[in-house]
Amino acid sequence: MINITGLPQEFKPSQYKIEIGNFLSNRTGHHCYFQQWKNRNKESAIEQQNPGENGHINLVFVHDILGHHGRMFPLASGLASAFIEDNINFSFLDFCGHGLSNGPRAHVDEFSIFSLDLAQFINKITEKNQHEVVLIGQGMGALSLFKLIEQYGHLLTKKPKGLILLNPILKTTFELDDKIEAPEFWKLPLANYAIEKDLPFGLSKIKVRRPFSGDDIFTQPNQALKYESDPLVSKYLSLGIFRELVKASKEIRRFSYFIDIPSLFLVSGHSYLTDPDVTYLFHKGIPNSLSTLIKFPKMMHEMLFEERVNLVIKEVECWIKENFLQS
């Protein structure tokens, strides 16, 4: 596994102790990479106080499809600076097959694996300190949070206090190439077939070129170029992960009434990967007292790399303060 000795300077929170590690997935047997930022000023004080007191929070970040933990750093770094005087830690997970985790690249056999690994990770990091947990997910990561709450919440030793969801992929709007290179007897529209039926003979692991470019999801050309050159962002994805993403999004759309904790939806006006209108309808299915939706009409899918990302960070900061840091 690749080892990272540091972070990009602009996202390096010097006031926090950075710890990295991995755990063995109970479901796949792959090693899953994680990273934690622990407040140097508050860590010893937290250990001496009663767990669960006001302000003892662990923000857990989960990334988008084909992404990795580092794609969440702009938001995390901004919040880390804002909450330096609060008892807040930050945790990041790379899903199997993504980033610095093991496993077939950009592939998953079942979408539930993401949520089960996430449950295992949350239990691991709260085992000793019993911090309250707030979950933050983008795109596919947000979808995995919904599935965790709806289907696997009983596995968590501590129920999450809140959800922060950036452009959740509740309906996929990107498509794979209709024809995929395969042996002669499999020359058929496999992309569509993959959604409707199980693929035989291990064909779910067939890789196809990523059906979107940096220009499709970033407003700023320089950020699109950085995305394309990021060695941890896969340029391919498997038929299996696409099939599982489509299936999971269809399933989760029916279960907004399962969300019984405060939830913040942050939605771009233009998202190549998902339909913002579907997110709005999902949000409306949650009781008004629990769900807040904020639109950023001029932003694209990767809102954390927009020129005015400070607007996103400020909305998240205010929501966290209002819901979890009021004395």
Image (cartoon, helix red, strand yellow):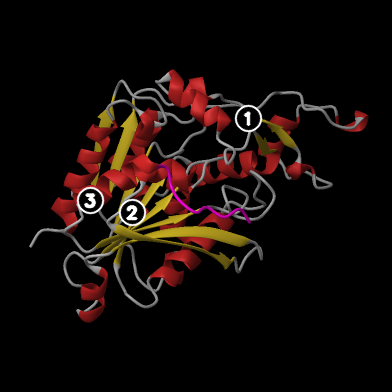
Residue annotated with mark 1: 210
In this view, the residue in front, 270 or 209, is 209
Q: Are marks 1 and 2 in contact (CB under 8 Å)?
A: no
Q: Is residue 129 above or below residue 83?
A: below
- Local SS, label 1: loop
Marks 2 and 3, the one that precedes in the sequence? 2
Question: Does the image show residue 288?
Answer: no
Between the C-alphas of marks 1 and 2, the distance is: 32 Å
Q: Which residue is mark 2?
A: 259
Residue 254 position within the rendered picture, expressed as x and y whole percent measured from the top left: 43, 45
Give the residue displayed 24% in from the left and 76% down from the top.
51
Instruction: Determine whether the residue tagged by mark 3 lies in a helix, strand or loop.
Output: loop
Instruction: For label 3, count other residues whose C-alpha is less than 10 Å away and answer few (under 14), some (14-19) or many (20+).
Output: some
Asked if the residue under mark 3 is in contact with the one under mark 1, i.e. CB atoms within 8 Å, the reply is no
Q: Is residue 5 part of the magenta span, yes or no?
A: yes
Q: How far, Cα to Cα, is label 1 from label 3? A: 36 Å
Locate the N terminus by quadrant: bottom right
Tell which of 226 and 282 is nearer to you: 226
Q: Which residue is mark 3?
A: 290
Q: Quadrant of residue 245?
A: top right
The segment highlighted magenta reads 1-8
Visible in this render: residue 75? Answer: yes
Q: Amino acid at mark 2?
A: Ile
Q: Are marks 2 and 3 in contact (CB under 8 Å)?
A: yes
State which quarter of the image contains the C terminus. Answer: bottom left
The amino acid type of the residue labelled 1 equals Arg
